Image (cartoon, coloured by chain):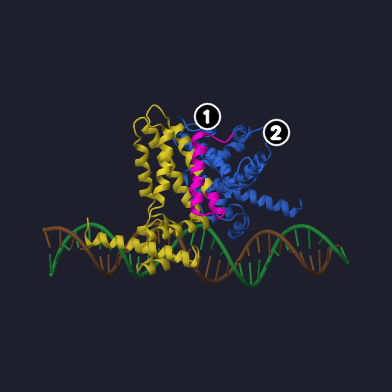
Chain colours: A yellow, B blue, C brown, D green
Amino acid sequence: MVGLRERKKQRTRRALIEAALRLFSEKGYEETTLAEIAAAAEVSTRTFFSYFAGKEDVLFYDSEQQIERALAYLAAPAPGQTPADLLRDFIEDTLSTSDDGRESWSEQSTLRLELIMREPPLQARALHLLFDSQLRLAAALSAAFPGRLDRVEAAAAVGSLIGAVKLAVMTTLIDGLPVEQARDAARRAADVAVHGLPR
Amino acid sequence: MVGLRERKKQRTRRALIEAALRLFSEKGYEETTLAEIAAAAEVSTRTFFSYFAGKEDVLFYDSEQQIERALAYLAAPAPGQTPADLLRDFIEDTLSTSDDGRESWSEQSTLRLELIMREPPLQARALHLLFDSQLRLAAALSAAFPGRLDRVEAAAAVGSLIGAVKLAVMTTLIDGLPVEQARDAARRAADVAVHGLPR
DNA sequence: ATGCAAAATTTCAATGCATGAAATTCGTTT
DNA sequence: AAACGAATTTCATGCATTGAAATTTTGCAT
């Protein structure tokens, strides 16, 4: 499993991701072609598609792992923990994990977020991935509370929480506010979702 | 404004929409080309793009009007009405408006929904449009309760409500349940968003 | 009615994403 | 080192999208 072949594939994958991120940032998303990305990673254009399904997907290379992490979290409530508790903890956990110390990672992560926010096709792709993941999370939540949360309630709960956080965070980012404010907004939004709308 | 020119444009627009919907349903979304749609509407392929921004957009021809209707609704709360009341009424109003009696409309509407649910690029486009509209709705809601709902709270409220309804409805539709059940799910989801998560 | 100007459409050409199939190179296995 | 399979490249093609120039259609003034 750790033969040369595997290592080479991982290196190519990395090269494609980094070339794409760099070129997108330098010259813009639309303006960089797949041919340029492939050339920068020293593979043929065709090979790009054996690593990623399309031009947009190269920026979402880690979405599946993130989803699985979230699924694992929701699948294992502590004894006595209510759905509301679990979901609130989940948000808190996600927010604290996101300020992961590493320098270079955080910078790439910021670049990527800016790109996704700026480019409509990337935004659409991100929303679609997020939506699909919510369906899976809802199923997991319902399964984690058998007999207590039916599929519709679980879907409503997950949709409400993520919908609130998503829109609140995006609102602060559009206003150009810094990441800490976005984090605050996320917490306030989670409160709204957990406790109900302001009266 | 109601000259021959305008009427002709509207007719062409309709022809494109109907041709697209028919062909998409008959042969599938990917399988029908813009050239075929244009031919069926008796215009050149290039002309398609002076009516719609892209292949996907032809199915979302009425999104702007729907958004404006929603914006108008949220901009004018009755005296004494709380944000929660207003949002709940908004959902209820939307649900009852949606079973608009007309036969042919409802059929086209169903076809369109099925297409959007089945085709990933259409789903992504729909989610993106919905997201943008939520940003506008949140701004309107915040403006409708000046001093009472800041931008973040309004965003959280709108995101929570629409997020809950969206995911709950989609869950029922994926399960193949009929529209009435989807309506019920929407109401239950709205309750979850308005009152908070199940405890 | 006739002709002019603006608006809309068509024609033409080019680019880039995406995909299938055949040919080739490369890593692994024996 | 030969054979096998996986990965890559090459080649060919379809389709969406866009710009620019040429042409047609429409509204309007004379």
Task: Give residue D18's position: percent from left, percent from top.
Answer: 57, 64
The residue marked by circle 1 belongs to what chain? B
Left or right: A76, with B29 as reference point: left
The kind of residue tagged 2 is Pro
Name the N-terminal-most of marks 2 and 1. 2
Tell me: residue B180, above or below residue B13. above
- Check the image and name the residue furthest to the top: A147
Task: Give residue A158's position: percent from left, percent from top.
Answer: 45, 38
**Secondary element at image label 1:** helix
Q: Are marks 2 and 1 in contact (CB under 8 Å)?
A: no
Q: Quadrant of residue A50?
A: bottom left
Which range is magenta?
A: A170-199
Label placed on residue B184: 1
Task: Give residue B92's position: percent from left, percent from top.
Answer: 60, 32
Q: Is residue B69 visible?
A: yes
Q: Residues within 10 Å of mark 1 (few under 14, many from 20)?
A: some
